[in-house]
Amino acid sequence: MNFSVIPAGLVLSPLTGALLIAAVALNSPHRAQALAVSSSLVCLIMAGAALWHCGGGGVIEYAYGGWPAPFGIAARIDGIGAVLATLIAALACGIFVYAGPTLRFEMPALEPPFYAMALLLVAALLGMTATADLFNLYVFLEISSLAAYALIGSGGGAASLASFRYLLIGTVGASFYLLGVAYLFALTGSLNLADVAIALRDVPASGALLIGLALLTAGMGLKMAMFPMHGWLPDAYTYAPSAATALIGGLMTKVSALVLMRILYGVFEPAHAALLPPLQTVITALGCVGIVAGSLMAVAQRDLKRLLAYSSIAHLGFIALGIGLGNQAGLSAAVYHMVAHGVAKATLFLIAGGVALRLGSRNTHALAGLHRTMPWSAAALVVAALSMIGIPPTAGFFSKWYLMIGCLDAGRIDLFAVVVASTLLSAWYFLRLLETIFFTEPAAQRHHEELPLPMLGTIVAGAVALIVLGILNQPLIEGVIGATAMLATGKMGTP
Amino acid sequence: MNESLLVLLAVAIPAIATLAILRSDGWPNVREACTLTAAAALLTTVGWLLAHVRVEAPVEVTVAAMVPGVALRLRVDPFGAVFAMLASVLWLVTSVYSIGYMRGLREHSQTRYYASFAAAVSATIGIAFSANLLTFYLFYELLTFATYPLVAHKETPPALLASRKYLVYTLSAGVALLAAMGVLYAATGTLEFTPGGIERLATAPAAVQYFVFTALIVGFGVKAALLPLHGWLPSAMVAPTPVSALLHAVAVVKSGVFGCVRTIAFVFGANTLRELGAADWLAYLAGTTILFGSIVALSQDNLKRRLAYSTISHLSYIVLGAAMLSASSTAGAVLHMVNHGLLKITLFFCAGAIYVTTGCDRVSQLAGIGRRMPLTMSAFAVAALGLAGLPPLNGFISKWYLCLGGLETDHAGLAAVLIVSGLLNVGYLMPIVYLAFFRSSDEFPRYGEASMPMLIPLLFTALVSVLIGLWPDAGVGAWSLAHTIAQSVQ
């Protein structure tokens, strides 16, 4: 079997889907949905194959047009990339299955364009996980951002403003990134990640190099909403259509975090490890502040989607902390948390969408008695909340565990304490949510009105996945993430 | 017979019962049949396992790998089997009692109640059979979430407040456990319970040992209601009485105590702790808690609160027994775990029976009630004497070994604490018996016992307490098992 087309196929499949929708399905929501689901299914199969192949440290490379790197543009997917690609494809697939009823409710005329835009976003995100080229990455970053602006803005009303704000901040982030790439290109004459890493060895540590590193970090920090660069996130997540929030909130920030990880440990560490510690100190500190501040802001929210958005900021803090630690356990925790948090948060946003559809409100008080009216959704919400708090055997516990071990390995008792104690902060707002659901009398008596099967199926699948991912975390961590986290750190494998 | 299957079954039966109970919402008889069937099945399973580990090596099942070196693993050793046996016997008894109590009061949300109850039992069995700290932690957290709806059951503002308090205490405890596990794992690479202690922990730096010990004791001490971590327990008495009976006198608090004993004997081991000197402060803390609980109980007028403070005091008997690090005191601790469970559940059953039948929940209202409910109050008297440690009741036997351990290890002061606490026990429980039988009142003119589903369980547990007092090694052989366990961890 020929795996080498996968890195290109991952991008082409959803791109084709998006174009096909624009060509033949703009008047037919059902056809658009079918196209979206099938093209993301194709992606899922390819990503699964890549995961199968890259498990244990394999790499798949593809040279566009047959020009070998570093002269041509190379696509490359490794274990971590395959994990993220599988996550992206699986979530996209689930969300497309789910989306129909909420889209008809929230933006009736815009259904087919939603699928086209969402596929464009998926294509760009997959491209970011499967590229070996810094500039190509920028292109995908901009495509994903443009698609996201459109998706967020399609919510209408306040969403337009949120989208515009995200556009301004996002453009600044992307510009930082592009400038950083320009610095690296000027210093090394190359844009290929592996090639830049090698060329950097002959480049002395200079002001230019430092500025490049700082620009790249700041750019990705903005895109991954690292505290205090998170300002765009709460409004964007709150006002976007539910399905779009799930897609963007579940995936976009994680891919940027992956890029940051690659740049720090794949490009800079092998040649200029001495540059990293100060930056790592800053990133871990920001991660910790993000965890605490995000959680406290979440406690103050009464709007379900906004609460989830602030919780995202806290959990991106976990990922930043893992990246900042930079040791094997920390990086594994960061990657694993991208998956665990991606699935949990997407599931929660989908539930929020379902609640908005049935109860017409995003206020947390509207959730009272949810276990009677929508028992399966309520059960899924409990599982996802437990994963967010980090209760075993759900996936969230294990990312927290590896992060704890990473802190101890690095000898950072202070960070360890923050990670451990953050459990209580997450528990604070999630358990209050559960108390509202189970022990508050609903304002109006409601009948059993569970969501339609496609929506419910996706939500329940997300909850089940959290438990399965938790129980099967060890093969995942050991087989894929562990092996490639070492690759990325340059401790083995890099020539 | 494949024992490892039985181990999984023991955890699965109550879990399946939870789902079955949720599905049978709206058919009360089917629902209660589910509970009773599951309780009987669980008792059979655990009984078989207990008989098996009396003679054979511990049974072990690895369910899934969790983190490198630590798996989700269940192991039935004698100590875990005794605890599981206690929980499953009392679940069956409490289930019968619950039916009388909940129907007698026409309580709301009974389906949620029975489902949470079964889930809590599943978590308790999981705790009993956990082979390592991580598995223990998993079930310990599940127990918190399963019991939370029971504390909040009444849905009144005080109940919700108590349930929040409960969550704050128990989740903070979970955080302490998590921190302890992280440090222990980073230092030794294992979390496995080992009789006599984890070897590599003995060579770890003293600061690490101190931290792990303190954090584990804080983590388990919350559910074990050690001073000053006991605050949730009296508040949680707002729950329905069967909940107080099984969960807040037996399963939940005993899980905490069980964790303390596991920490002392199976994580650290007597030798490591003697060198570290950390067990001493725990013993003195437990001694203080014993006196504190007993003295505060004297002044409580609410019957359930009085029993709650008595529970706080008696839980520390067990912690004290383990912390004194001798074979006799450890055996006494294991025995007291069983004996206190039986005695205290009898007292709670009586309190609930009185409440359902007469609506009285304060001690001062009970004058002359012995005339109306003679059987209930006789059982109450038996259990009260048992807790005070009067021979030939079962409470005497465990207290004997606890005192013996105190003398063996030159902790005469702590042995004296146990004696004084026995007197205080008489002081806060016997006045109730006196009021009931020897003071007349016009309140309770006629004979009127509680309904059969409530009366039979409380008579049964009182009777078992007497029988164990007379023949400590009859039945499941708790006496010899306790000594086997105590020898194995020395």
Image (cartoon, rainbow, N blue to C red):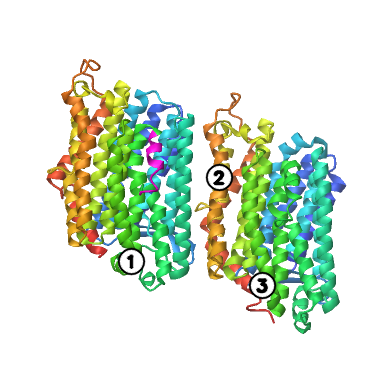
Q: Identify which amino acid the numbered label 1 is placed on.
A: Gly
Q: Identify which amino acid the numbered label 3 is placed on.
A: Pro
Q: Are marks 1 and 3 on the same chain?
A: no
Q: Which residues are magenta?
A: B226-237
Q: Does residue B293 appear anywhere in the picture?
A: yes
Of residues A278 and B476, the one drawn nearer to the viewer in this rendering = A278
- Give me the residue at 69% from left, 31% from top: A360
Residue A155: x, y in percent?
Answer: 79, 40
Mark 3 lies on residue: A277
Of residues A340 and A213, the one drawn nearer to the viewer in this rendering = A213
How many angstroms separate mark 2 from mark 3 (CA)?
33 Å
Q: Select label 2 or label 1 by which is in front.
A: 2
Residue A428 disc label: 2
Q: Is residue A149 above or below residue B263?
A: above
Of residues A493 and A442, the one drawn nearer to the viewer in this rendering = A442
Which quadrant holds the C terminus of chain A?
bottom right
How many angstroms separate mark 1 from mark 3 (CA)?
39 Å
Q: Identify which amino acid the numbered label 2 is placed on.
A: Trp
Whether the magenta-drawn stretch holds residue A444 is answered as: no
- Give me the residue at 25% from left, 26% from top: B452
Residue B255 disc label: none
Which quadrant holds the N terminus of chain A?
bottom right
Whether the magenta-drawn stretch holds residue B227 is answered as: yes
Q: Select label 1 or label 3 by which is in front.
A: 3
